[in-house]
Amino acid sequence: MFAYYMELALRSLKRNPVLTALMVLAIGLGIGASMTMITVLHVMTNDPLPERSAHLYTPHLDPLPLDYTHGGNGPDPADNLTWPDAMSLLRAHRGVRQAAMAGGTLLALPVQSGLQALYAAGRYTTADFFALFGVPFEYGAGWSAEDDAAGAHVVVLSDELARKLFGRADVVGRTARLGELDYRVVGVVSRWDPAPQFYADSTGSQFSDIDTFFLPLSVAVNEDLPVSGNESGWSDDEKAGSSKRGAAMSWLQFWVQLDTPAQVADYRRYLVNYSAQQKALGRFQRPPTEAALFGLMDWLAHRNLVPNDVHLQLWLALGFLFVCMVNIVALLLAKFLRRSGEISVRRALGARRRDIFVQLGVESALIGVAGGTLGLAIAQLGLWSVRHRPDDYARIAQMDPSMLAGTFVLAVLASVLAGLLPAWRACRVAPALQLKAS
Amino acid sequence: MELRPILSTLRRHKTTAWLLILEIALTCAIVCNAVFMINHRLQHMQMSTGIDEHALVQIQVAEVAPLPDIYARAREDLAVIRQVPGVQAATLVNQVPLGASSSNANIMLEPTQRQPTLNAGTYFGVDLGPTMGLRLLAGRYLRPEEVLDSDVVLKALADGDTKVIAPVTVITQAMAQRLWPGGEALGKMVYLGPIGVRVVGVIEQLARANAYDDATAQYSMILPMFMGAGKDQSYLIRTHPQDRHAVLKAAVAALKKADPRRVVTTQRTYDEVREKFFENDRSMAGILVGAIAALLIVTALGIVGLASFWVAQRRRTIGVRRALGATRRNILVYFQTENFLLATIGIALGMVLAYGINLFLMMHYELPRLPAVYFPVGAIALWLIGQVAVLGPALRAAAVPPVVATRSV
């Protein structure tokens, strides 16, 4: 029966090629635009570290004075930690692993003379960083806690930066010049670029930044290396409010690995206790319950990385899809009703309403399949154009298999849905009336 | 034109007619809002910076090794640049308007104030006014002897020895208006934290580097401090607009010649600065234009499709009417009126919907209220599109010969 309906549908579609093309084009455009934007939203809210995200948490304290009000549209200083707090959390060692970190951009000098120096973005962090996030090493390894304590001038390079500086990746033991200092290379990591860069400060380009070097945080503090994130001070005292070691300047990010719910609960308690203790000491002024522990995905949701323009574009695309759907419903309805005569003959010959309904449904679905295929192509084109846009998230605008299947399902669903009303109306045509009229 | 026959025909195709009306309404509502958003973006992109944009080029330089004296180096570099043929003026500045990377300060009217009155972009440099081509409205620019090296200023502030520094500033008119509405700004004091500075000049405009918000885009002030060479500082060169590419190239070459080891990290005309700053707005405006075009085309094609159906369906009726004496013109006008009627109902619904969409956008995306002038835009667009789309099928209907009436279907 199905094969017969297919044949009928094909014949009917071929009878009005222009109209068929119009409907396929409309659904293709609508689906293409919507899927482009849904894909962009999907990749922007993606889990950057699927294997580890469930166990990664970032603690937050509120060291701001009571009378501090967050003015303007700048980032909240309480998003980051101060040096004394980060070091206390690190020393307390309450998680399975933990690391403090901050971003930095340094001028890197290639060893071969004649090559242009280049700006390299990287991270100042502590020894556990690599194990905490599972950064894959190609050569060598990270540095030790002793290196952190001693402020050793060691560096881990990305494969990409190693090749740019030395012309090859196997460079453990060699000396790299970054900024105004020399560092001994202890490790080289292969490409590792979680998008969004969840562990970075909120002021960076979360989707396009990639770390190309890692060096001990203690070195950055000792040598006062430039920090690329937000450094917010809230004290008139020069020492506390604008030096890296200051107790009134936040600039560090902190991540901790907690494997069981009990560990998470313990850590929460520890943060509140720590805040209470700091309040008792007179350093903190706000209630200790302001201390919070965010899971990775909660933290990304809290940060709301998706720009308003992307939301607007998604609404626009969905609005467009809806207009296309209404268009198709109207066209299908007109088309099916025009075939009242044919339908009446079939009904008079014994076809039940259900049969007519299924027959017309198959025709709608066929348009959906064609429209979906076209929509997929248009969405690919749309994503290609997104990748060539100046936006931060351009790089990651790619369709994964689940989105591909989703597009197709949406297209067929949309057109079957669009075909429902017309098919229902058409199958309710009273055969006697029609037959008499013709 | 008699409306009754049209209405009675439409009543027999109620569902289809309502679907078409719904489509027109949706398109009208989206088009109204999209045109408004495009205009909003375009207006933002037209933001005036107050500087002589076409005459300026920007160069940023980074050093590989620490410099013994960043101030001496900056003065040498400026001397080198001024030697380049075609350079009219050159200066060192800590930020450029619309340059994205910004330096700002909280401004207060009293030193004891807990909450700042406003936040302003802070420009540091010598001779910024003449080099950038600013327009002085009152008072004077900072004098070169007032502009001290930043380490001297910072040391004096740290020691509390404020006698050596000249606490003066030049502010924009917008900032003066905001601080002292309707009043005179010259001679008044503003405070950057505990530091008081006296307003000695008011300039017409100077956009800040992070001018994302139109309301505060012109809050800028010039402070007497010379920053010295550094990777975040910019050499700003003024030249004749038609020479700027050549001058930029020559200046970069001269700087590289003075010290081959350093890296030129930025070299661009000011027009490129502006272009980069508004890149996202331009691309969003482009997307909106595309969306409007796609919506109107889909709606037009929908109207064509539906009208063609109706014409084919009513061939016999049309033939009868023709046989009974209706002219071709009558038939044409009939279909045109029918479309006009549907479009009008759609547009009326669309207006309400447009208002609703705007309310939603205002709530969630900080968009301003849709001005009433945008409602006719959507209406006219859809009336026109409707009439153009229906013309083809209507002409086909008008061409139906009266003899059709005598044939059976």
Image: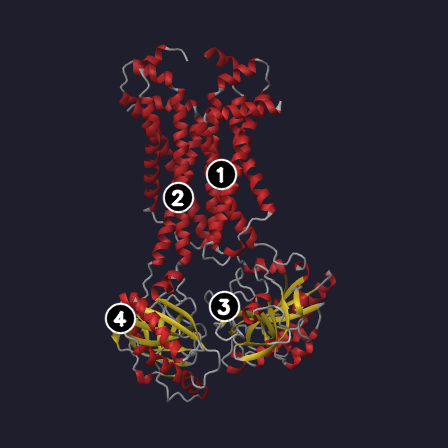
Relative to A246, is A210 above or below?
Answer: above
Q: Nearer the viewer, mark 2 or mark 1?
A: 1
Which chain is disc 3 placed on?
A
Q: Amino acid at mark 1?
A: Gly
Residue beneath disc 3: A70
Q: Are marks 3 and 1 in contact (CB under 8 Å)?
A: no
Rendered-image quadrant of the N terminus of chain B: top left
Give the label on residue B292, or none. Answer: 2
**Left or right relative to B190: residue A287:** right
Relative to A259, is A40 above or below?
Answer: above
Pointer 3 or 1: first along the chain: 1
Q: Is residue B135 visible?
A: yes
Give the label on residue A28, or none. Answer: 1
Occupied quadrant, residue B112:
bottom left
Q: Amino acid at mark 4?
A: Arg
Q: Are marks 4 and 2 in contact (CB under 8 Å)?
A: no
Q: CA distance from mark 2 to mark 1?
A: 17 Å
For label 3, the SS is: loop
| Crowd class of label 3 (few under 14; some 14 to 19; many from 20; radius 10 Å) | few
